[in-house]
Image: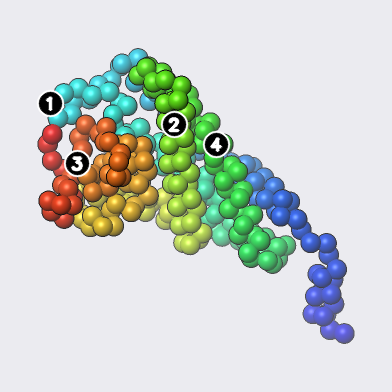
């Protein structure tokens, strides 16, 4: 009997790892990574600060010839999400950079079960974390705007969904690129390239995760990304309608 046969026999004799144990192990990996707590803490501070500034009426920006509150500037309020994305990016990409993925695959050779456990763990961490970083800031904004209880819950649901969408996209990019830097660079630079006019393909722009998220929040950055039936609250609604041209560009309101 060869060593390989002995190893295979020993592996078969080991008890199967339960899925919930795999998920728990992956959750522990994410939560014990230093980048996770740092990213969550910074995102919480940024969102809370924006909420307090809005509630206090300390800042109003001139847009389209009038002063508008921060609550109407979806792009600015959504910006902290890029700090939050450090969590899913490191959850997927750090194992490749450190070489730990080889150890993980040796312990769990079933790639399908491992992929399921990692995705479940990501959702188990990011959804509650998104609520944690959003609640103080969003409550400050919605309560100061006089929003009723149902509206507050709807607002939190939309923002949590937007954060989760961005986290899933970042996680997928990090796993595909096997990097913790490239996914964040892509997600951050893409809106910049659109805003500066470098990237001008409306059919693609409306499918980008950040634009879908802003549309979900009711503050689409461009008319071509506005969801049907959603009224835009963006005071500087940029771009031209898909029915009036294909170029996405700023316009005065």
- Label 4 or label 1, whichever comes before in sequence order: 1
Separation (CA) of disc 1 from disc 2: 30 Å
Indicate whether 23 appears above or below 40: below
- Tell me the element at label 2: helix
Q: Which residue is mark 2?
A: 154
The answer to whether marks 3 and 4 mark residues whose Cβ atoms lie closer than 8 Å is no
Q: Residue furthest right?
A: 1
Residue 38: image x %, image y %? 53, 36
Which label number is shown at residue 39? none
Image quarter of residue 66: top left
- Tell me the element at label 1: loop
Q: Which residue is mark 4?
A: 129
Residues 51 and 216: in front is 216
- Label 2 or label 3, whichever comes before in sequence order: 2
Indicate whether 38 appears above or below 152: below
Categorize mark 2 by other alpha carbons within 10 Å: few (<14), some (14-19), many (20+): few
Categorize mark 3 by other alpha carbons within 10 Å: few (<14), some (14-19), many (20+): some
Q: Residue at x 30, y 45 (%)?
A: 227
Q: Residue at x 64, y 54 (%)?
A: 117
* For discs 1 and 2, the disc positioned in front in the rendered view: 2
Q: Which residue is mark 1?
A: 65
- Label 1 or label 2, whichever comes before in sequence order: 1
From the viewer's perspective, tell me whether residue 39 is left or right of residue 55.
Answer: right
Q: Which residue is mark 3?
A: 238
Instruction: Name the image quarter holding the C terminus.
Output: top left
- Tell me the element at label 3: loop
The answer to whether marks 4 and 1 mark residues whose Cβ atoms lie closer than 8 Å is no
Residues 94 and 122: in front is 122
Q: Residue furthest front?
A: 229
From the viewer's perspective, tell me whether residue 195 is left or right of residue 143.
Answer: left
Categorize mark 4 by other alpha carbons within 10 Å: few (<14), some (14-19), many (20+): many
Q: Residue furthest bottom?
A: 1
């Amino acid at each position: 009997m060869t060593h390989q046969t002995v190893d295979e026999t020993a592996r078969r004799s080991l008890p199967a790892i339960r899925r919930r144990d795999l998920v728990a192990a992956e959750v522990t990996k994410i939560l014990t990574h230093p980048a996770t707590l740092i990213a969550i803490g910074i995102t919480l501070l940024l969102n809370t600060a924006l909420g307090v500034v809005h509630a206090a009426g300390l800042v109003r920006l001139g847009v389209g010839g009038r002063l508008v509150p921060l609550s109407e500037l979806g792009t600015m309020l959504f910006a902290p999400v890029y700090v939050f994305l450090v969590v899913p990016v490191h959850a997927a990409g750090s194992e490749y950079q450190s070489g730990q993925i080889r150890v993980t695959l040796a312990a769990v050779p079933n790639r399908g079960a491992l992929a399921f456990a990692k995705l479940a763990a990501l959702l188990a961490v990011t959804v509650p974390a998104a609520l944690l970083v959003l609640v103080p800031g969003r409550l400050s904004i919605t309560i100061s705007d006089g929003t009723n209880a149902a509206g507050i819950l709807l607002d939190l649901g939309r923002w949590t969904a937007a954060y989760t969408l961005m986290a899933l996209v970042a996680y997928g990019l990090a796993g595909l690129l096997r990097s913790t830097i490239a996914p964040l660079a892509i997600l951050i630079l893409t809106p910049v390239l659109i805003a500066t006019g470098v990237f001008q393909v409306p059919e693609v722009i409306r499918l980008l995760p950040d634009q879908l998220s802003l549309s979900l929040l009711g503050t689409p950055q461009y008319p071509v990304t506005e969801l049907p039936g959603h009224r835009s609250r963006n005071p500087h609604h940029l771009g031209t309608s898909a029915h009036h041209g294909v170029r996405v560009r700023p316009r005065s309101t």
